[in-house]
Amino acid sequence: MDDKFATCSATLTNALGLHARPSVKLTRLAKTFASNIEMAAGTEGLWIDAKSIVKVMAVKAAKGVTLRLRANGPDAAEAMAALRALVAEGFADDEGLSERAESLGG
Amino acid sequence: MDERRLIGKRAAAGYAAGPVAVLLHAVAAARTGGDRDAEAKALKAAIAAAAEDLSQLAARAEGAGADIIAFQIAMLEDESLAEPAFADIESGLGADESWRRALDQQISDYESTSDHLFRARASDLSDIRDRVLAALNGTKADAPLPEGAILVGEDLTPSRFLSTDWSRGGGIVLTRGSASSHVATLARSQGVPMIIGVPLDLRNIESGTRAAIDGENATLWLNPAPTTLRALSARTSAAVTLRNGGGRELLPAATADGTPIAVYANISDLSEIERMDIAGFDGVGLARTEFLFGHGSGPPGEEEQYSVYRRLAEWARGKPVTIRTLDAGADKPIAGLTLPHESNPFLGLRGVRLSLAHPEVFRVQLRALCRAAAHGAIEIMLPMVTVPSELQLARRFLREEAHALRAAGAAYREPSLGVMIEVPAAAISIDRFDADFFSIGSNDLTQYVMAAARDNGAVADLNDPADPAVLSLVARVTAHAKATGRKASLCGDAGGEPKYVELLLRDGGLRALSIAPAALGPIKRAIAEVDLKRSEP
């Protein structure tokens, strides 16, 4: 396999940070890629598997935290571009719905 | 098998016979780790079954509910959730204990975070934990119980009670529990026999064992002899005849001296109205709404609430229907909404406090109520009001929702807004509350005034609604209501107990009681025996 490496970072802009709904979206998207994808919160955070919602949720990243992402595999560059866009756009179209679901959980 | 007889304490009268259904959450680890491969296989299968259950739930859920279920499914499907459990199985532990340990670790991790949104996810993980444990034990978490089953467990949650179909009989036997818990209130209102504090070792009783219970005498029989069953059914039919005697319950209630007393019904679930007639009642004094929220798939939508409230109003045929806004919290937890593990939940975020903390949920309920009020005499009641600002804020929300409906051209009516008086602070300073009506919640008022928990049998003697301290607060509320031309009633369990009726009318100054439907006959008879013209009984 022709493995490639790619990295990127993006800051959490959505009000609730990496809560349940955004974590579901992020891991779902990550799983669509063949590459290994890892994530870390801030500069100090440990690298964890970005395809595992259990681990992504355990990071408990709040709004304003910068996520670092790195990928290793055939579609590493595409994975980074897609994930960065998802985070930068505040987890896309239905953030309003997401916020509602999260605040219901509070 | 020989008949075995056990005596507990009475929580709700009635008779039932049927197979035992042991409540799963009350059962300690029963499987033993032995064949590691078999245990690992069992856990894998249970996780898959739980995910399948959730997928079926997801197909029916919408909005926030669907999001919560999608999250639970994603967690279940993530192999790293079960990783520590499989490691424990490898070291010889049973599948159930391994899973419980792994999930309890996750749950305590979420509970220890300072972010309240993350903390609230602990309840989702508890749901996941219990669902898989149930699958491991060979039952689905919300599997229907066998017909007429007798639930046996340590304690029972109100949501479990509400999700059980009691129309084909059945009963409740608890090794702990309390006669003044919400479950006991629900059991009395639906005529489900219930016994608490039964000295029974749950590990030694199997689901499917034949059993019979007599709530009146707080007795449980395991493997009852045919003679026992015959004696019980004879006694039951005699009690039913006595209870329904005279046809008096259809006549308006009045004391011996002719003072009219309004008698309203307490309704806990929509299914109750199918089995009763409003004819004997002056209306509904308390319609609970918790049953709408107990599904575990998020709060109900506006349309669902609207159609339920409207059905209630239409069923009442023009008689007033007082609907209480969501009263969750304390011993009525709702996954995803109430805070898990408050250090003192009865003094925590419950009742209107919870609604005001979740305005997006509260406003949906108010909007549905305004719309339904266009079809009947709906009134809104707020639970656990403590200070006037809570009433003022709720009224502002109500007005705003009513205005929005008017602007949208929708059919609506802004209902009158009353408060439930169950916090001593509100009863003591009753003149501060500009409510349209007052309804005394004697269960909570009693436990807060007497500082004696309603779910603790050890202080049951102190939890006395007839204590002069409680009655003086009741009298204070009724006197203020009379002086200012407002309605006042009492909707706690005390109103449905014949022995308290005279005290409530005479010392408490009440002229309206809201009671469990099953208590109608006895309460009207008790009212008719009171002579308020006579100075002392």
Image (tube, rainbow, N blue to C red):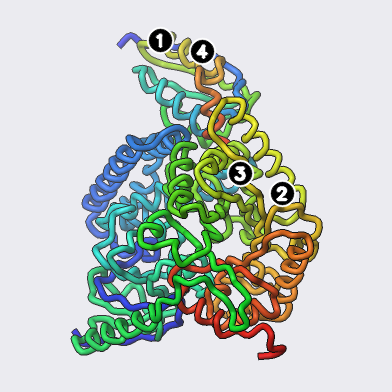
Mark 2, secondary structure of its residue: helix
State the residue at coordinates (49%, 30%): A21
Mark 4, secondary structure of its residue: helix
Q: How far apart are marks 2 and 3 (CA)?
A: 32 Å
Circle 3 chain:
B
Give percent across and percent down for residue B481.
Answer: 74, 63
Q: Say the numbered circle drawn on residue B391.
A: 2
Q: Name the residue under label 3.
A: B113
Tell whether label 4 touches label 3 (CB within 8 Å). Answer: no
Q: Name the residue under label 4.
A: A85
Q: Mark 1 points at which residue?
A: A4
Marks 2 & 1 on one chain: no
Query: In the rendered structure, which disc, 1 or 4, sits on the residue that comes first in sequence?
Result: 1
Would you say B106 lies left or right of A28 here? right
Give percent across and percent down for residue B96.
Answer: 33, 56
Q: Distance between the residues labelled 3 and 4?
A: 29 Å
